[in-house]
Image (cartoon, rainbow, N blue to C red):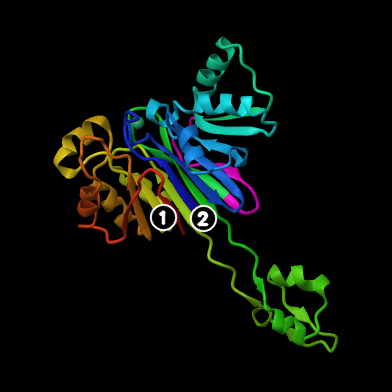
């Protein structure tokens, strides 16, 4: 998996910081997660090919998480896109986008599919043979979801030397990769473990922005490889965090610890702070593997 942070600051776009948007490359998919104002410029700066984006996941309808979407849809139109575009987001997103297109007398030459979300329980919203995407219901001022991206367990890896040794024909390889034992002509059964290696462990990524401190999400994100959790404020502004239904760095680290995640990435910083290093220091008091998101930063895992 490769995660490119296009923007990870709260509220307004500024000279050197952008509102929330990220690109997750996972099993041949290029998923766009949130689409704050200026996302298409950030996509260009970070050399993400527009044509690769077929699925956009919007957490909630606060401006700093989706005001870039209609612009991106419009640019796709000008680039003569033909491929379907799927948008997953809270109920209302279809009405907002279609109103803007209709009033400006703009029509996409490609199919635009809206998958509007209303459930307060975690649900599967995308699935193919290799990946599943689920919602993570969050606690915020308006209806909000995080998203959990999980790779599925792949097939077993063929032990090329072993299948050669037993002179097994290629037409049996798929069965063996699916976990079946093999019977030789003399009736001897070769166990699958002698013919294959374990598949690579599937990875998972949880995106949680924006949310108040909420231990209810822990069961959904248990043991993920990487958790992105918002931290708009530091502990000293905990009252502001509570009032605006955001989290502090300390709260993000407590969620990471409770959920037993491997890595925690912090983001959605309020621009009131001069340096983002203080978020890392605060989070490290409770959780050791803390990374700081920043615009243009790439994480591979
Ligand atoms: Zn918000």
Give how far across and how far down residue 251 sits, in percent. Answer: 25, 47
Give how far across and how far down residue 252 sits, in percent. Answer: 28, 48
Is the residue indicated by label 2 positioned so its CB lies within 8 Å of ligand 1? Answer: no
Range covered by the magenta-colored residues: 118-131
Find the residue positioned furthest to the right: 185
Give how far across and how far down residue 72 sits, in percent. Answer: 54, 29
Q: Which mark is residue 226?
A: 1
Residue 282 placement, left or right of 215:
left
Between the C-alphas of marks 1 and 2, the distance is 10 Å
Task: Give the SS element for disc 1.
Answer: strand
Give how far across and how far down residue 284 sits, in percent. Answer: 23, 57
Residue placed at 50% from the left, 33% from the top?
40
Say which quarter of the image contains residue 18: top left
Identify the residue position indicated by label 2 in the image. Answer: 1
- For the stretch drawn in magenta, the main secondary structure is loop
Tags 1 and 2 touching, CB below 8 Å? yes
Residue placed at 43% from the left, 37% from the top?
145
Residue 189 placement, left or right of 154:
right
Res. 207 in view: yes
């Amino acid at each position: 998996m490769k995660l490119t942070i296009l923007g990870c600051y709260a509220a307004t776009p500024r000279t050197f910081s952008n509102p929330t948007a990220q690109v997750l490359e996972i099993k041949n998919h290029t998923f766009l997660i949130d689409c704050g104002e200026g996302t298409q410029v950030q996509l260009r700066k970070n050399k993400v090919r527009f044509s690769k984006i077929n699925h956009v996941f919007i957490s909630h309808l606060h401006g700093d998480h989706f005001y870039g979407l209609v612009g991106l849809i419009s640019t796709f139109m000008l680039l003569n896109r033909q491929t379907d575009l799927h948008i997953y987001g809270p109920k209302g997103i279809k009405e907002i986008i279609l109103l803007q297109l209709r009033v400006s007398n703009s029509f996409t030459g490609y199919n635009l599919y809206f998958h509007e979300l209303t459930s307060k329980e975690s649900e599967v919203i995308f699935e193919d043979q290799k990946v599943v995407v689920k919602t993570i219901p969050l606690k915020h001022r308006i209806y909000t979801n995080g998203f959990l991206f999980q790779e599925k367990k792949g097939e077993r890896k063929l032990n090329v030397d072993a299948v050669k040794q037993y002179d097994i024909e290629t037409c049996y390889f798929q069965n063996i990769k699916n976990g079946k034992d093999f019977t030789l002509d003399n009736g001897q059964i070769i166990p699958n473990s002698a013919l294959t290696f374990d598949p690579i462990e599937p990875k998972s990524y949880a995106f949680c922005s924006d949310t108040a401190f909420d231990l209810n999400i822990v069961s959904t994100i248990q043991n993920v490889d990487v958790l992105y959790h918002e931290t708009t404020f530091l502990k000293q502004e905990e009252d502001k965090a509570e009032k605006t239904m955001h989290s502090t760095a300390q709260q993000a680290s407590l969620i990471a610890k409770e959920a037993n995640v491997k890595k925690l990435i912090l983001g959605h910083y309020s621009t009131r702070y001069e340096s983002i290093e203080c978020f890392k220091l605060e989070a490290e008091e409770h959780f050791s593997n803390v990374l700081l998101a920043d615009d243009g930063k790439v994480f591979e895992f």
